[in-house]
Amino acid sequence: MSFPLGNKDLKIGILGFTEGNGHPYSWSAMFNDYDFDTMEECGFPVIPRYLEKQPKSTIGIEGAHITHICCTGFEGYERAQHVAKAAKIPNVCTHPEEMIGEIDAVIVATDVGSEHVERCRPFIEAGIPMFIDKPMVDNEEDLKTFIQWRKNGAKFISSSSMRYTKTYEAYYDKHYELGDLVYILSPMPKKYETYGIHALEAMYPFLKQGFVSVRNTGTFERTIVHIKHSSGCNVNIVQGLDMAGAGMTVIGTQGSVYLQNTDSYYGFKKQLDLFVHYLRTGEEPFPFEETIELMKLVIGGLRSREEGGREVLLSEICTED
């Protein structure tokens, strides 16, 4: 398959499903529109609520549609059928490989990093470009695999939608009134394995590349992470399985600001818009080196917790055999 794909009508497949993650529903709806009554039955009450707030003019991406779906793992064919009905997807597959030859690109809409190598492998080997939901990986060996695939010419990107939070974006490159940044608190609900990347990628564009170490003194149920950046800025991430969501606090030498995420749809939709732009032009939303560093922060945070809260240097995490 030649890449980039240019202005052709894009047929995109979507893969799911993992526990607690409704992205196959919401992301497919952002491409295809949706059936309100069926979406109400999806089991993720927040999804129909933020979808219904949107003017119809914001739904859809010109010349791109989700045409195939396959759900394997946590839930399978019956779930895929329901997503297809809710988000107007015409083809339901039993096995992911059935999509090959029928689609132009694939979205891996699952958030278990340890599964992504095997979910992606058939499509990488077939030369099909991909978007991979966060986190791309959660272990060192899989990170090596993705980096090698990239060196071999595979076309894929990965990100958290929190990078595109409407209220955060305005501050990423224009926070002069805060002075030099000295501290960021980026809290997040749920567990570090799957939602830690949301907290990491939300704050990452403030500081960009240059993270030095990560230390996790929490537990599986309650995460407490301390991250050091080469600029001298310190970052804390707190998470809890029973914790509500919260905004982000950014403190500098001359001021501070508290930012809240009030529009989930905006971040998800922009992420998908940029994926389609990548498919058409080959232009990445941000350098792949940033994804590598973010994955090291995920891996280092998990390693630190497993090793009793040891400070893990990112330089310890090898990316080549």
Image (cartoon, rainbow, N blue to C red):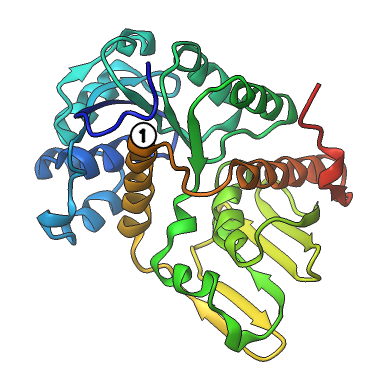
Between 140 and 209, which is closer to the camera in this rendering? 209
In percent of the image, x 81 and y 32: which residue is there? Answer: 318
User: x, y percentage for residue 65?
Assistant: 20, 32
> Which residue has dot 1 on it?
279
Residue 4, compared with residue 158, is above or below; it is above
In percent of the image, x 17 and y 38: which residue is there? Answer: 32
Between 178 and 238, which is closer to the camera in this rendering? 178
Q: How many marks?
A: 1
Q: Quadrant of the C terminus?
A: top right
| Circle 1: element type | helix
- Asked if residue 41 can be seen in this view, the reply is no
Q: In the picture, residue 202 is in which quadrant?
A: bottom right
Residue 214 placement, left or right of 81: right
Q: Residue furthest bottom?
A: 254
Q: In the picture, residue 251 is in which quadrant?
A: bottom right
Query: Disc 1 marks which amino acid?
Result: Leu
In percent of the image, x 23 and y 34: which residue is there? Answer: 7
Residue 68, compared with residue 216, is above or below; it is above
Specify few, some or many for label 1: CA neighbours under 10 Å numbering under 14, 14-19, or 20 or more.
Answer: many
Q: Quadrant of the N terminus?
A: top left
User: x, y percentage for residue 159?
Assistant: 50, 45
In percent of the image, x 42 and y 67: which residue is there? Answer: 261
User: x, y percentage for residue 194?
Assistant: 56, 42
Residue 307 placement, left or right of 164: right
- Asked if residue 140 can be seen in this view, the reply is yes
User: x, y percentage for residue 243?
Assistant: 54, 60
Q: In the picture, residue 173 is in which quadrant?
A: bottom right
